[in-house]
Image (spheres, coloured by chain):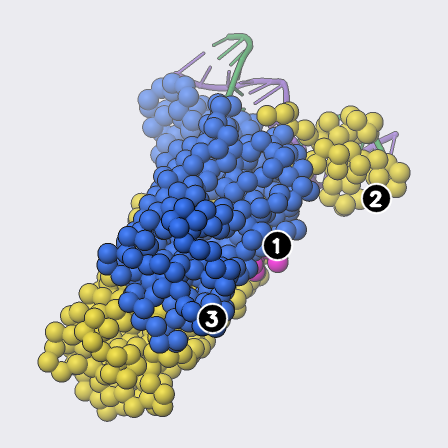
Chain colours: A yellow, B blue, C green, D purple
Amino acid sequence: MGKVITICDIAKEAGVSISTVSRVLTGNARVKDDKKQRIQEIINKYDFHPNQLARGLIQTKTMQIGIITADVCNPYYSAMFVSCEKAANSLGYTLLLSDSFGDRRKEFELLEKMISQRVEAIILIGGLVDELVTDTEFAEKVNLVTNQIPVIVTGRLDGTNCSRVNIDGNRAMELVMEYLISCRYKKIAFAGGSPTVKFTAELRAAYHKLLKSYGFSYNPAFDVPNEYYDENGGYAAMTQILKEKELPDAVIAVNDLTAAGVMRAATEHHLRIPDDIGIISFDNTYIAPLVTPQLTSVGYNYAEYGETIVKNAVAAISGDGVPHETLIEPVLAVRQSCRVR
Amino acid sequence: MGKVITICDIAKEAGVSISTVSRVLTGNARVKDDKKQRIQEIINKYDFHPNQLARGLIQTKTMQIGIITADVCNPYYSAMFVSCEKAANSLGYTLLLSDSFGDRRKEFELLEKMISQRVEAIILIGGLVDELVTDTEFAEKVNLVTNQIPVIVTGRLDGTNCSRVNIDGNRAMELVMEYLISCRYKKIAFAGGSPTVKFTAELRAAYHKLLKSYGFSYNPAFDVPNEYYDENGGYAAMTQILKEKELPDAVIAVNDLTAAGVMRAATEHHLRIPDDIGIISFDNTYIAPLVTPQLTSVGYNYAEYGETIVKNAVAAISGDGVPHETLIEPVLAVRQSCRVR
DNA sequence: TTGAAAGCGCTAACAC
DNA sequence: GTGTTAGCGCTTTCAA
C-alpha cells in the first residue's frame, strides 16, 4: 500500500502551513483565492480526505450514530436500518450497524465497543429492549452509557430514561380486528410470538380485550404463542391449531414470516386462503406481497419510523429535550389473504 | 450528558501515571498485581473504554473494514453482510456498512467517507462492480483507494487489481440445467436480469451454451431480461413469456425475488407449479422456502462466501498475497417448485 | 490572511 | 515496574 498522505504533505507541496490547508478543508475561515485554489488542486490530485479519527479526537463530533439490531437478515430490521440510515445520512450522520444475533453477551459488548468508537448516540432495535420484563443488568449497563451519550430504543427499558419510539400495538390490533370483522370472520385465532416480548404481549392483550368487546368468546386453543418469529414458528403454531376439531376462520400472525408458515400449514391442510381461512399479520415487510395469496398486513410508515428515531437521537445529541415516548401509527395494507368484505 | 472520562482521570484516581493505566488496558507490559487490580477496579467503576479514535490515530489500526452494498433490504445482500460480519468479528474486526441504493454518486462518496474514517479495507458488493462493462471513472477512483488500502470486490472491476470473490456462474447454470433436464423439462425459459450485469450475462451465456449442448433449440421469446431484480421484474418477464402460443414447461428465474413474481404470473395464468411449469432460481435466500410451493434454488454457502471475502481482506491488510480471483461453488437446494424426477 | 503552537486521548519508546 | 515524553493528524486559538 502506498504511503497515506496527510495534511502536512499537502501543506508542504503547496508551500503553506498546515493551518492554511486546514482552513480550506473546513471552510471555517477565509483563505486567499489563489492559495485556496492551489491547495484544492493538490488535494484533488491526491484524492486527499482528512483523517476523521484525528478530527473526531479534537471535536468530539464523529458524526456517527451506532445502531444495534438483532439480525439485519430479518426484513423488519433491515427495513428499520435502511430508514434510519437514510434519515441519518440526510442529517450528515453515518450509521454504525452491528447485529447481536440474540446473544445477550454480545449486546453488552457492542454497547462498549460503540462507546469506545465514540459514536454520538446509540439506537437499540430488537434484542433485550424487546423483553417484557427488563433485564435489570442490561438497564444498568445502558444507564452507564446514557451517562455519556443518548440511547434511543424501540421497545422498553425500565429503569432507564432512554427516549423510546414505538408502534402503537393496541391500535395495530384494533385495525386487524376491525378489518377481519368487516370481512365477516367470526372465529379468530392468534398465532406465534413469545409471551416474553413486550410488543407481542401488547398485541395479545389487545386481542383478548377486543375479542371481548366484539362479543366473541376467547378460545385458548386458538391462542398459540411460539418463540420463533419465523416461518417455522408460524408453521408449528398453525399445526397446533389445526389439531382442533373446530377450526378458526381467520388467523392473525404475529409477523409476516410467521404468516408464511401459517399459510403453508393451512394450505397443506387443504384449506383455501382466503375462502376457508383468512390470514393477516403485522409488519407489512416486503415479503408480504411475495407469498401467495399476497398477504394483508398491518405495517408502519418505516420512513417516518426511522426518521423519528434518528431525529430524536440527533436532538438528544444537541442536548435538546426529546419526548420520552413517541408512538407510530400503524397502517393497514390490504391484499388478498382475507376475503373481500 | 456527564463528562466523558479519559485515561487521565483513571490515572489520577489510581495515583499512577497514564502509561501504567495504558499498560493494563493493552496488556502489553507487566504491571504490579495490586496496582493492576486497583486500576481495573476504577476502570470498571466508571465503565471506562479507551477512545478508539485516539488509538486508531497512533496505531493506524482501526480494526474496521468498510462494506458497501446496494441495499441491505435485499435478502442476498443482507445474507452477505451478515456472513461477512460474523467472519470479521471472529477476526477482531468490525464492519462499517453503507448502502449505495444504486446511486452512482453515492458509491463514490462512500468510498471517500470510508477512507477518511480510516477503515483498513473496503469490500464492494453489488452496485458498480456488478456492471458488465466497468465504469472507468469508478475504476480510477478505486485505484486511488487501493493506493491506500485494499479493496475486495464481488463482480469485476477491470482496470484495477482488486482481489475478487465470485460465484461460478457457469457452474450454477449447469446445476440448474442438469436438474431441470433430470426432471424431464424440455422447453426451458430464462426470466429476468439485466444484460448489463456481469453475473447475469454469465448466466445467460451459460444458458445458451447448455441449451445447445443438450440439443435444445434456442427460442428468443423464452429469454426475457428485466432490469429489476424483484418480484415485479419477474412478474413482467413472465407475463411477456405467457403471451406466446407455445409456453415453456420450466422457467429459470435470475433470483428468488424474480422467481416469486414468475410464480405469481404463472399461477394467475392457471398454470400449476410444478406440474404444468417448473420454476427454479438463483441465490437460495431465506425467501425461497417462504413461497408456495417452496422454491428450488441454486445457492451458495454464504458463510464460506463471506469468510473468503473477509479473509482475503485481512490478508491484504497484512500485506500478504491474495488470490486475484476466488470462485465459490454453487449448491442446489431442491424444494417443491420442480416436479419430482 | 497567515503561521506557530497547543492539545484532543492514547500508545510506545525511552529513561530510571 | 513505572513515569516522562514524543508524537499520531488534525483544528483552533493566539499573534503577527
Q: Are marks 2 and 3 in contact (CB under 8 Å)?
A: no
Residue B336: x %, y % from top left: 27, 61
Q: Amino acid at mark 1?
A: Asp
Chain letter of the residue carrying label 3: B
Measure the alpha-carbon separation of dots 2 and 3.
69 Å
What's the magenta bit mostly, secondary-structure-wise? Answer: helix
Mark carried by residue A16: none
Mark carried by residue B244: 3
Between label 1 and label 3, give the one nearer the viewer.
3
Bin the neighbour count of mark 3 within 10 Å (Cα to Cα): few under 14, some 14-19, many 20 and up.
Answer: few
Q: Are marks 2 and 3 on the same chain?
A: no
Q: Amino acid at mark 3?
A: Glu
A85 in the magenta segment: yes
Please tell me which residue lies in front, A207 or B150.
B150
Please tell me which residue lies in front, A313 or A214.
A214
Span highlighted in magenta in the image: A84-92
Q: Is residue A38 left or right of residue B54?
A: right
A308 in the magenta segment: no
Please tell me which residue lies in front, A314 or A144.
A314
User: Is disc 1 placed on a helix, strand or loop?
Assistant: loop
Residue A213: x %, y % from top left: 27, 89
Residue on which the image places disc 1: B103
Q: Can residue B156 be seen at all in this image of the molecule? A: yes
